[in-house]
Amino acid sequence: MSALADNPPPLWDYEWDDLVQVWEEVDAPEGCKVEIIEGLITVTPPPSNRHTFITDPVQRQLYTVIPEDWGVYQRLGTAVPSQQSIYVPDVVVVPQRVLRREKGYFVPAAAAELAVEITSRSTASNDRYKKPEGYAEAGVAFYLLIDCLAPGGPTLTLYGEPKGAVYRTLSAVKLGETIRLPEPFGIDLDTEAFVVE
């Protein structure tokens, strides 16, 4: 048996606390999003107007159905230490008590009831593959992917029922159609307002 088999290399090159410290200290240009994705610190440009335009109706519709002690937040860091990741979802629903309790700049992803990501050219691959895996592993009940760059045309896919690092696809619709968010939301999310000419 080889020495490598007896002593496998560490899964991550950096300790979690070291990564978090570097992430907190990154001096990125204003408006850029800084995340840790599988141990790598990534910086993405500010969102486009289209991207920002979509977050507003999502947030507005969610506020009509969530309990008063939950919040809908943009760009709140959500940590998945087991994946060496801190994601900064475009929209996330988290009970307010979690923000009051947690110090620093992020909350445990496990506290999120829903995470929403809107793809851009710089984030599409992570939004489609790495983030669903991390959110599922953390136990986030629902992950909504608004994929404006999907090969067959813009789509929305709702994932749920996480088991390990895998979600089940609950529904998928074309942008402009309605997608059902089950309880505790119990809303037909109208995406017609997301369509940009």
Image (spheres, rainbow, N blue to C red):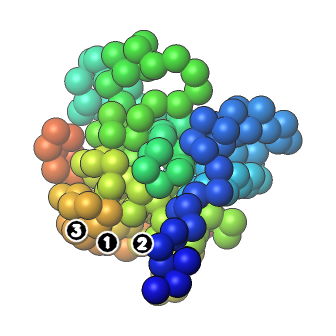
Which residue is denoted by mark 2 in the rendering? 155
Tag 3 secondary structure: strand
Q: Residues within 10 Å of mark 3 (few under 14, many from 20)?
A: few
Quick check: 27 left or right of 20? right
Q: Residue at x 40, y 14 (%)?
A: 101
Q: Residue at x 51, y 68 (%)?
A: 7
How far apart, in angstroms, are the residues tagged by discs 2 and 3?
Answer: 17 Å
* Amino acid type, callout 1: Val
In this rendering, is residue 109 above or below 195? above
Q: Earlier in the sequence, mark 2 or mark 3?
A: 2
How far apart, in angstroms, are the residues tagged by discs 1 and 3?
Answer: 15 Å
Residue 173 in the image, given as x and y percentages of width and height: 31, 71
Q: Earlier in the sequence, mark 1 or mark 3?
A: 3
In this rendering, is residue 37 above or below 20? below
Image quarter hosting the C terminus: bottom right
* Amino acid type, callout 3: Arg
